[in-house]
Amino acid sequence: MNPGRMSPGHMNTGHTVLHVRSSAGLYGAEYVVLGLIPALAQLDIHSSLLSIDNHLQSAQVLYDRAVALGVPAARLPCRGRFDFATVRALRATLERTPNALLHVHDYKSALVAWLARGRLRVPIVATSHGHFATSANLRVYQRLELWLMRRFDQVCIVSAEMRAMLAAAGVDAGKVHLIENGIDTQRFTPDAVPLQRDVLDIAPDALVFGAAMRLTEQKNPLGLIDAFARVAQENPRATLAIAGDGALRAAIEARVQELALAGRVHLLGARADLQCFYAMLDVFVLPSLYEGLPLALLEAMAAARRIVATGVGEVPAVLHGLAAPVAPGDVDALAAAMRDALQQPRINAAMRERVVERYSVARMARAYAAIYRQCGEADGRAAA
């Protein structure tokens, strides 16, 4: 069954879907959930966000963003790495929510959901937004999440390459579904009002390369700086703008100074107006070392930008026939692709067409609705 091919009409599954997420900030998975909930409402499926508090942060940014967007949301208390109060709060929510279905989006929410469900007849759907174990702790959490997925009703992945890992962990292949991320194609368009270059100290005639990313090793911002330095040597109009923040910001600033790129690299910090950021760019660059299905790529494609991207995760499938991905970590190849991109038309309508056809939030919602329906059908057979 291909859930993405369901008809777009009335699809109420009878469930109230509770999306549980433990978050350290506003990144790709958070925006997937924030976009999915309103899209499900268009299908007459009631769902809401249950945001697990992050005890390391004073502001609960996922919950706050949901409220600002009008997305139904509530907080689950959590005063440490793990807190049984979180389990009790979720259990109480399940007990007062008829026909609840839990949709979990990370290892902590998976564990909390499994413990809170207990013997209640509540289906659990898990989405793996990407398993990248870069530390001993993360490897433990990954093993725990994979163990739990064997016990959940349905498991969704955002990249086909994740299937092998789930199979090796003993997850039944029959309950694993590829549901690619979707974005709001009405927000990210070629017609969005671009950021004003002069406000950012960018020359009006500059050739602007740009990236939207967390400043972490996974996203490879230092590799991007090194590749841009090669392009900048040959093209005095080349400028680089990066939207996002993270642990490597100081290292990036040092590399910019070391390579004498001050004034040509602009670190814009985290932004809520990415649709305007993409519209300002001449070329969007995704230099990541590993990914699942990055939203930033889809957003830039929906804005019809020229694209340079490494061939990680689902990226080769997304760009098939449109652009040739670059080997991750190859600075020379990345620089060459950036140079070549400047020879292409600035507006690439085919990029947007690909996203509208295959990666819209509406398509993603229909696919998840079909998964919820499968859970309902299985629950009905069990009750009979």
Image: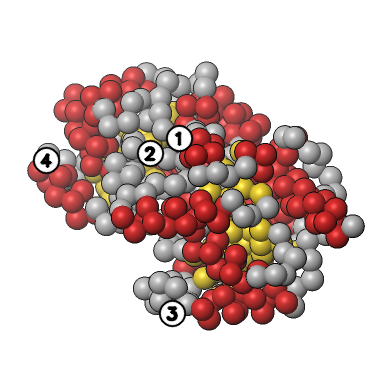
The location of residue 314, given as percent across then percent down, is: 49, 33
Element on which disc 3 rests: loop
Work out whether mark 2 precedes mark 1 in sequence or the reverse, and give the earlier one: 2
Residues at discs 1 and 4 in contact (Cβ within 8 Å): no
The location of residue 354, given as percent across then percent down, is: 59, 29
Element on which disc 4 rests: loop
Q: Residue at x 74, y 78 (%)?
A: 96
Q: CA distance from mark 1 to mark 4?
A: 33 Å
**Residue 313: which numbered mark, if any?**
1
Residues at discs 4 and 2 in contact (Cβ within 8 Å): no
Residue under pointer 4: 260
Work out whether mark 3 precedes mark 2 in sequence or the reverse, and give the earlier one: 3
Quarter containing the C terminus: bottom right
Q: Residue at x 55, y 61 (%)?
A: 110
Please tell me whether mark 4 or mark 3 is closer to you in this view.
3
Q: Residue at x 67, y 39 (%)?
A: 174
Q: CA distance from mark 1 to mark 3?
A: 34 Å
Q: Quadrant of residue 24?
A: bottom left
Quarter containing the N terminus: top right
Identify which amino acid the numbered label 2 is placed on. Tyr
Left or right? Give the position of 383 relative to 348: right
Left or right? Give the position of 212 relative to 113: left
**Residue 290: which numbered mark, if any?**
2
Neighbours of disc 4 within 10 Å: few (<14), some (14-19), many (20+)? few
Work out whether mark 1 precedes mark 3 in sequence or the reverse, and give the earlier one: 3
Neighbours of disc 2 within 10 Å: few (<14), some (14-19), many (20+)? many
What is the residue that sits farthest to the front in this orientation? 170
Residue under pointer 3: 79
The location of residue 95, given as percent across then percent down, is: 73, 77
The location of residue 330, given as percent across then percent down, is: 26, 27
